[in-house]
Each structure stands twice: as structure tokens, then as C-alpha cells.
Amino acid sequence: MHSIDELRVHQLLAAVPHRVRRRFAETYVAELCERPDWPVLRQTITVWTEHGFNLVKTAAALNIHRNTLVYRLDKIARREGDRADGDADRLALYLACVADHLDG
């Protein structure tokens, strides 16, 4: 069961036409989508953002060791480069992940 507040972003993105949402997602995660571990990386980005970029809380929510989380985030950072540095970039990456999940 989820609170409606937890689903507002999903609701907003679902209201965007599919092709626009897809184009937005591809702008931010096209290279990551090609990886075989993309579903895990997408979940990592989503949970990391939803837990305020806190490593301990994110690792606990994903039920993984903190070092595993750091490894995944490093893998994402290597692919995304400067795109994952600022808050606006992190938010766009998160929204792209949610959009991709809606279309997946």
C-alpha cells in the first residue's frame, strides 16, 4: 500500500504524452538503458533520490551493503559524468528513471 503523496510524480509523468516522456527519458538514460543491469541501476537511482541521497538509508531500503551502493553509484557516475553532479541534474535523472519505469 502506498500513500497518494508517494505517487504524485508518477501521476504527473503518466499525464505526459508517451513520446514526449520517452524522449525525455532517452535524453538522460539512453546509455544506461543499454546495460544489462539497467533495471537494478534504475532502482538504485530512484531509491537513492527518494531517500534524500543518503547512503545509509538507501542501502537499507535496497537491502544491500553500503559498499555495494557506492559501487553502483560510481558505475552510474562514470556513465553520466557531469549530468549527475547538480541537484537539477539529479532530479532530471530521477524523473527519467521514473518515466522509463512507466514505459517499461
Image (spheres, rainbow, N blue to C red):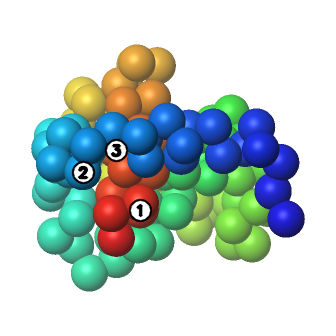
Tell whether 82 sits left or right of 6. left
Amino acid at the residue labelled 2? His
**Label 2 Cα crowd, 10 Å radius (few <14 / some 14-19 / many 20+):** some
Tell whether 28 sits left or right of 60. left
| Residue drawn at point x = 41 percent, y = 60 percent | 102
**Label 1 Cα crowd, 10 Å radius (few <14 / some 14-19 / many 20+):** some
What residue sits right under mark 2 in the picture? 18
Examine the rendered structure and indicate whether residue 72 appears above or below residue 7: below
| Residue drawn at point x = 76 percent, y = 37 percent | 5
| Residue drawn at point x = 46 percent, y = 72 percent | 40
- Distance, label 3 to label 1, CA atoms, is 8 Å
What residue sits right under mark 3 in the picture? 96
Tell whether 40 sits left or right of 25. right
**Label 3 Cα crowd, 10 Å radius (few <14 / some 14-19 / many 20+):** many
Closer to the chain start, of discs 1 and 2, is: 2
Give the x, y percent position of residue 95: 42, 39
Closer to the chain start, of discs 3 and 1, is: 3
SS at mark 2 in the image: helix
- Distance, label 2 to label 3, CA atoms, is 13 Å
Give the x, y percent position of residue 80: 24, 42
Can you tell which quarter of the image residue 32 is in?
bottom left
Amino acid at the residue labelled 3? Ala
Can you tell which quarter of the image residue 2 is in?
bottom right
Q: Which mark is residue 101?
A: 1
Tell whether 22 sits left or right of 48. left
Please report contact status of discs 1 and 2: CB closer than 8 Å, yes or no.
no
